């Protein structure tokens, strides 16, 4: 009893000390989010002490981090616009703001290192048999190719600082692929991860709808988006999970809850108004019938036909309406009009300059560490994005322009492997939870692809986290299923 009381007293004293430290930092820095660090570290210590006593601590730790990363906002992406501040945005500084390293990077590096040191020696043979080297090689490809192009660019007159800015976060994706492969290893965790991610995205959508209606005129007239650029990609994950739950779960209360959640997520998705996400969603829906198993097509043929007919009718009725209801017609009319209808858009000029860089060095690329030349003068957007000539929007063209054929080949291989792996799992899975994982991954990877083409998506930390985890998970689970099938055939 004495030891327990002593331990409890020590924890309370430590908590009070952390509170005083946080208060002191808050006063000295005039409200910096860094003031949350002592309390955050204390909370992390308590969470780790509990998680490490559980039978699967790595899965509990990753699940907790997933929940946290969706609950707080990516402050580096100007969450909620330039005038609205929320406490979830302030808290997001601990994960997304760089203090030399960001919290996302620290977690990825530390967890990958711990997994490698604790599990690699005894599990390497099993991991090797199911393709660890294959998936990590694909994951590391873009980082290695970009690093080679960066060294070339620096020796060719580029700046080291510029090179590091351009490839700053590319090391994170392979770490998340490794973590996904090792930790997202079974059906139970897949169900938990998708469920809790969806719950957090529903809560974030409720927050988004509340913020939208309490600042209606601001978002209607001035702000470019509601939550952030990439929230729409995650909202699609939630919508896929909710729709599948609505179909599978026959309980009235669950269906009611799903319908309410779908309403909030759909509103937040429309209010966020990211046309890049709309294109990715359209690609996923077009690809879906090609990959869908025949048994599912036969089961849902009538409902699918009605859904398509309803979507066509909705598009026709709302084509000339203003957003958000008329988002499809507005989306179609908005492409290519950033600088007006009578002249090339900003993206046209940016892509033309990148293509010029490609043609000037087709075999090597111009090398990272440089800015592309404005052969075709563009509007100056440095007041909102000062790195616009270092990291342009179209990262596919940028990879070719800066990194040459090697980098664009590595990036193309990565996306081809992601989409093929997700599609294969979706097509061959016989269990609902694994089919859902393949479906969610397919939708997310195509969102990730369109964001990489049009909106810097490959550079964003949370995008890399979700893409890497899903890729590693799909690859491992598919390999495990293949091995199980072969074992059954061998012993029949």
Image (spheres, grey):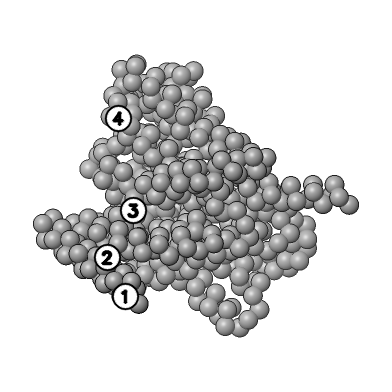
Is residue 330 or residue 39 the one in the foreground?
A: 39
Which residue was labeled with disc 4?
A: 162
Marks 2/4 in contact by CB < 8 Å: the verdict is no
Task: Name the secondary structure under disc 1.
Answer: helix
Q: Residue at x 22, y 68 (%)?
A: 13
The answer to whether residue 110 is above or below residue 49 is above
Disc 2/disc 1 C-alpha distance (Å): 40 Å
- Residue 109 lies in what quarter of the image? top left
Task: Name the secondary structure under disc 3.
Answer: helix
Q: Nearer the viewer, mark 3 or mark 4?
A: 3
Q: Residue furthest top?
A: 156
Which residue was labeled with disc 1?
A: 2
Q: Give the x, y percent position of residue 235.
A: 48, 61
Q: Give the x, y percent position of residue 8.
A: 30, 72
Q: Residue at x 33, y 29 (%)?
A: 163
How many other residues sit within 10 Å of disc 3, few (<14), some (14-19) or many (≥20)? many
Disc 2/disc 4 C-alpha distance (Å): 33 Å
Is residue 262 or residue 55 the one in the foreground?
A: 55
Which residue was labeled with disc 3?
A: 95
Q: Residue furthest bottom?
A: 252
Which badge, 1 or 3, comes first in the chain's sequence?
A: 1
């Amino acid at each position: 009893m004495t030891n327990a009381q002593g331990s409890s007293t020590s924890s309370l004293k430590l908590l009070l000390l952390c509170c005083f430290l946080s208060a002191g930092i808050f006063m000295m820095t005039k409200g910096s989010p860094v003031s949350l660090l002592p309390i955050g570290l204390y909370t992390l210590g308590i969470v780790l002490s509990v998680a490490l006593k559980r039978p699967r601590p790595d899965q509990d730790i990753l699940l907790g981090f997933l929940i946290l990363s969706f609950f707080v906002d990516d402050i580096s992406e100007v969450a909620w616009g330039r005038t609205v501040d929320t406490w979830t945005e302030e808290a997001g500084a601990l994960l997304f703001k760089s203090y030399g390293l960001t919290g996302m990077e620290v977690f990825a590096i530390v967890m990958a290192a711990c997994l490698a040191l604790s599990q690699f020696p005894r599990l390497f043979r099993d991991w090797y048999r199911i393709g660890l080297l294959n998936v990590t090689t694909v994951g590391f490809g873009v980082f290695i190719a970009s690093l080679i192009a960066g060294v070339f660019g620096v020796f060719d007159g580029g700046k080291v600082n510029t090179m590091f800015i351009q490839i700053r976060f590319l090391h994170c994706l392979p770490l998340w692929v490794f973590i996904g492969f090792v930790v997202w290893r079974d059906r139970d965790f897949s169900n938990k991860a998708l469920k809790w991610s969806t719950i957090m995205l529903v809560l974030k959508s409720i927050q988004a709808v509340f913020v939208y209606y309490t600042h209606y005129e601001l978002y209607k007239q001035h702000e470019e988006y509601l939550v952030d650029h990439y929230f729409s990609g995650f909202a699609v994950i939630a919508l896929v999970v909710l729709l599948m739950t609505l179909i599978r779960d026959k309980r009235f209360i669950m269906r009611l809850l799903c319908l309410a959640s779908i309403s909030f997520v759909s509103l937040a998705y429309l209010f966020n108004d990211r046309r890049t996400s709309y294109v990715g969603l359209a690609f996923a829906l077009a690809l879906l019938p090609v990959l869908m198993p025949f048994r599912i097509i036969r089961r849902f043929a009538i409902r699918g036909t009605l859904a398509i007919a309803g979507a066509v009718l909705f598009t026709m009725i709302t084509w000339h309406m203003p957003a958000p209801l008329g988002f499809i017609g507005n989306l179609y009319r908005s492409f290519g009009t950033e600088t007006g209808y009578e002249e090339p858009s900003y993206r046209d000029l940016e892509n033309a300059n990148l293509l010029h860089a490609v043609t000037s060095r087709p075999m090597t690329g111009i090398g990272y560490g440089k800015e592309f030349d404005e052969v075709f003068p563009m509007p100056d957007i440095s007041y909102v994005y000062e790195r616009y000539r270092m990291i342009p929007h179209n990262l596919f063209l940028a990879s070719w322009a800066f990194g040459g054929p090697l980098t664009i080949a590595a990036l193309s291989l990565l996306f081809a492997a992601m989409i093929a792996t997700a599609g294969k799992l979706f097509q061959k899975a016989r269990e609902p939870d694994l089919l859902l994982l393949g479906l969610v991954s397919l939708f997310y990877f195509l969102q990730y692809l369109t964001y990489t083409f049009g909106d810097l998506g490959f550079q964003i930390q949370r995008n890399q986290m979700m893409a890497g985890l899903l890729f590693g998970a799909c690859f491992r689970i598919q390999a495990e299923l293949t091995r199980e099938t072969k074992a059954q055939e061998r012993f029949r």
